[in-house]
Image (tube, rainbow, N blue to C red):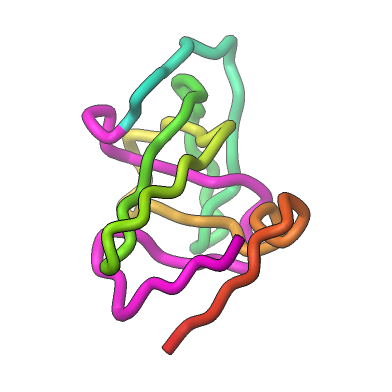
């Protein structure tokens, strides 16, 4: 599967994180509370993971991609898509 996001404003592709991160609870299609977990974010600070779930991301061409095991981290300023996770899942990323 190929993902092409052109100048995506609501999500940032991140090669340094280890998981997908979403700070907006309303974007989750499913969300399960998680026992205390933490994630190190872009600026090297640590934030608490409140839960994990599935988020559907709509590309500009209308195709919907479901991101699994997304961490809900309300204190993160950005929504992050982890490039290595997508690669392991067989996605091909093309940024234009």
- Residue 13 horizontal/vertical position (percent): 49, 67
- Above-or-below relation of 13 to 81: below
- Above-or-below relation of 46 to 28: below
The image quadrant that residue 12 belongs to is: bottom left
- Residue 40 horizontal/vertical position (percent): 59, 47
Determine the residue positioned at 50% across, 28% down. 49
The image quadrant that residue 4 belongs to is: bottom left
Determine the residue positioned at 28% across, 28% down. 25
- Above-or-below relation of 46 to 1: above
Determine the residue positioned at 51% across, 24% down. 52
Looking at this view, name the residue that lies furthest to the bottom. Answer: 96
- Residue 45 horizontal/vertical position (percent): 52, 51
- Residue 96 horizontal/vertical position (percent): 42, 89
Q: Quadrant of the N terminus?
A: bottom right
Question: Is residue 87 or residue 64 the one in the foreground?
Answer: 64
17 in the magenta segment: yes
Describe residue 81's horizontal placement relative to residue 75 as left or right.
right
- The number of discs equals 0
5 in the magenta segment: yes
Question: Is residue 92 or residue 32 the one in the foreground?
Answer: 92
* Stretch in magenta: 1-27
Describe residue 2's horizontal placement relative to residue 11 as left or right.
right
Determine the residue positioned at 27% across, 59% down. 62
């Amino acid at each position: 599967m190929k993902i092409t996001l052109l100048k995506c404003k609501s999500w940032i592709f991140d090669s340094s994180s280890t998981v997908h991160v979403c700070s907006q609870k309303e974007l989750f299609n499913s969300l399960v509370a998680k026992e205390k977990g933490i994630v190190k974010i872009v600026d090297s600070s640590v934030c608490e993971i409140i839960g994990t779930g599935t988020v559907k991301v709509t590309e500009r061409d209308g195709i919907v991609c479901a991101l699994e095991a997304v961490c809900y981290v309300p204190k993160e300023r950005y929504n992050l898509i982890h490039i290595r996770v997508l690669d392991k899942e067989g996605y091909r990323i093309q940024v234009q």
